[in-house]
Amino acid sequence: MSTLPSSSLAEPEIASPEALDELIAAVADLQSAAEHELRDRREWLSRELASVEAELADLAEESPVEEKPQPKETTDSVRKLTLPELIAVLEAAPERTLNIRKAHFDVKSVKALAKANPQRLQLGGKGGWPTVTLVELSDPPLPETPAKESPQGTFSFGEALAGSRKKKRKPKK
């Protein structure tokens, strides 16, 4: 049984850092060439698919269907409301609740308003469809007025202490 030297079992050794740099450059060249080839192939396949769709449309005597990209909501299309505006909108809403996104309101600003005014606004909803609800204000409790006491029961604290501090005098004989 012959044994191989331990260096042959391990990874091959590179003689110098320059050789390593050359290998890294070669790998990078191969990678960029493969990427370029795949991009060219994708473009060719896209053109081929478009021509096949045009032929199918001619056979069906229809015009080719053009796919229109869905317009994304821009930040300009959402409304940022102040608290009085939001309250007015919620008062007109059914059950005083609105879906923030469906109403095209800015979610961050409405959430900030709800966080700053929990006594008036409540957040709800699930996931990406948050709702805001106008909370009914409860009538503030009336300040309690103490029942009027009779004049006999009214005395000041000072009088009570003064009365307890008086020394009893001995009756004169």
Image (spheres, rainbow, N blue to C red):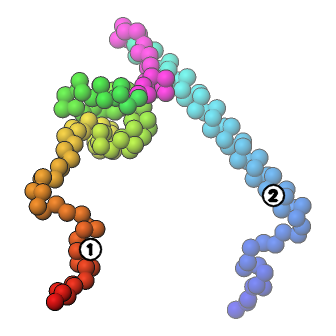
- Which comes sooner in the sequence, label 2 or label 1? 2
Count of number-bearing discs: 2
Which residue type does callout 2 highlight? Leu
Give the residue at the far bottom of this rendering: 1
Instruction: Judge whether residue 68 can be spotted in this image.
Output: yes
Q: Which residue is depicted at the point 44% across and 28% down?
A: 80
Relative height, residue 20 to residue 36 (above, below)? below
Residue 13, compared with residue 111, is above or below; it is below
- Residue range corresponding to the magenta coloring: 58-81
Residue at image point 18% right, 32% down? 95
From the image, which quarter does the N terminus lie in?
bottom right
Q: Is residue 102 at all visible to an observer of this figure?
A: no
- Tell me where residue 163 appears, x and y as whole percent: 22, 74
Left or right of 3 on screen, residue 102: left
User: Quick one: quadrant of the C terminus?
Assistant: bottom left
Q: Residue at x 54, y 26 (%)?
A: 46
Helix, strand or loop status at disc 1: helix
Decide if residue 48 is on the left or right side of residue 23: left
Specify whether residue 73 is painted magenta.
yes
Q: Secondary structure at mark 2?
A: helix
Residue linked to disc 1:
161
Name the one closer to the observer, 142 or 42.
142
Query: Marks 2/1: CA distance?
Result: 102 Å
Q: Position of residue 60 (x, y in %)?
A: 35, 11
Residue, disc 2: 23
In this rendered view, identify the residue nearer to me: 8 or 3: 8
